[in-house]
Image (cartoon, rainbow, N blue to C red):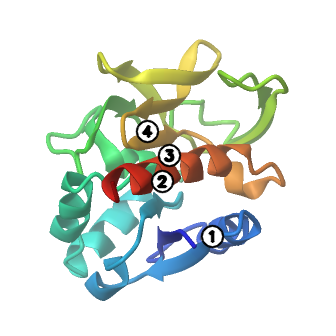
């Protein structure tokens, strides 16, 4: 059974665990370096990116997570998780993990409307997907090899850069598991390749 780690320091952790288990994978809440052993993929949840990044630093997880990325482990960042993954965040000198080849801007969808839900068309899916945005970031610039999977109001909100999947919104807050399924397929393909 595939083991999917979920960074469990702050934010929407339980909801991801529910979707991972619904898709017949084992969910491993990650709070320490030990929890990173043996995972086949890692989810970085939404929450508050400044808080999560401080906790990642405090628990000395930044280098171990980068090492996993170097070993090809797929990673999926939602909302604050996307901010952590990005190589550049608008207005900040340094990125956090700095792994995914995108430039991200925080809180991009207006101040009055902090959260909203829309239906989005996703590349490769016939039916629209429900997307819950909560003080969401968006991808301002996608690197050369980044595949754009969905946009909202002309802004990139879902994209894949090789082993990294980044999403502005919160798929885990809906009953629709297609984006998590997409990620688990990335993990499955990587696990098959690395065991050959
Ligand atoms: N606005 C938040 C941040 O910058 C992200 C919001 C979210 O994850 N729902 O950290």
The crowding category of the residue bearing disc 3, from other C-alpha atoms within 10 Å (few below 14, some 14 to 19, many at least 20), is: many
Q: From mark 4 to mark 3, how far is it between C-alphas?
A: 26 Å
Residue behind mark 2: 187
Q: From mark 3 to mark 2, how far is it between C-alphas?
A: 4 Å
The residue at label 2 has a CB less than 8 Å from ligand 1: no
Classify mark 4: helix, strand or loop. Answer: loop
On screen, residue 76 above or below 50 = above
Classify mark 3: helix, strand or loop. Answer: helix
Classify mark 1: helix, strand or loop. Answer: loop
Mark 4 or mark 2: whose residue is earlier in sequence: 4
Circle 3/circle 2 CB separation < 8 Å? yes
* Residue 142, label in figure: none
Residue at 26% from the left image edge and 54% from the top image edge: 69
Among all residues in the image, which is located at the extreme front?
A: 196
Residue behind mark 4: 106
Circle 1/circle 3 CB separation < 8 Å? no
Circle 1/circle 2 CB separation < 8 Å? yes
The residue at label 4 has a CB less than 8 Å from ligand 1: yes
The crowding category of the residue bearing disc 4, from other C-alpha atoms within 10 Å (few below 14, some 14 to 19, many at least 20), is: many
* Residue 25, label in figure: 1
Q: From mark 4 to mark 2, how far is it between C-alphas?
A: 27 Å
The crowding category of the residue bearing disc 2, from other C-alpha atoms within 10 Å (few below 14, some 14 to 19, many at least 20), is: many
Residue at 69% from the left image edge and 48% from the top image edge: 171
* Residue 186, label in figure: 3
* Mark 4 or 1, closer to the camera: 1
The answer to whether residue 86 of the structure is visible from this angle is yes
Mark 4 or mark 1: whose residue is earlier in sequence: 1
Residue 161 in picture, x, y percent from top left: 37, 32
């Amino acid at each position: 059974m595939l083991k999917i780690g979920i960074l469990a320091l702050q934010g929407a952790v339980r909801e991801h665990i529910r979707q991972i288990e619904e898709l017949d994978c084992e969910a491993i809440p990650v709070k320490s370096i030990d929890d990173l052993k043996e995972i086949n993929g890692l989810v970085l949840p939404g929450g508050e990116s400044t808080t999560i990044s401080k906790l990642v630093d405090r628990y000395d997880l930044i280098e171990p997570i980068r090492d996993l990325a170097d070993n090809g482990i797929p990673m999926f960042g939602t909302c604050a998780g996307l901010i952590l993954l990005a190589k550049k965040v608008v207005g900040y000198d340094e990125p956090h993990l700095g792994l995914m080849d995108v430039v991200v801007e925080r809180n991009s969808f207006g101040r009055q409307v902090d959260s909203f839900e829309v239906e989005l068309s996703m590349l490769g899916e016939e039916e629209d997907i429900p997307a819950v945005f909560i003080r969401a970031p968006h991808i301002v610039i996608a690197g050369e090899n980044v595949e754009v999977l969905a946009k909202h109001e002309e802004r990139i909100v879902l994209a894949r850069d090789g082993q990294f999947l980044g999403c502005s919104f919160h798929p885990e807050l809906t009953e629709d598991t297609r984006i998590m399924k997409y990620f688990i397929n990335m993990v499955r393909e990587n696990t098959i390749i690395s065991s050959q």
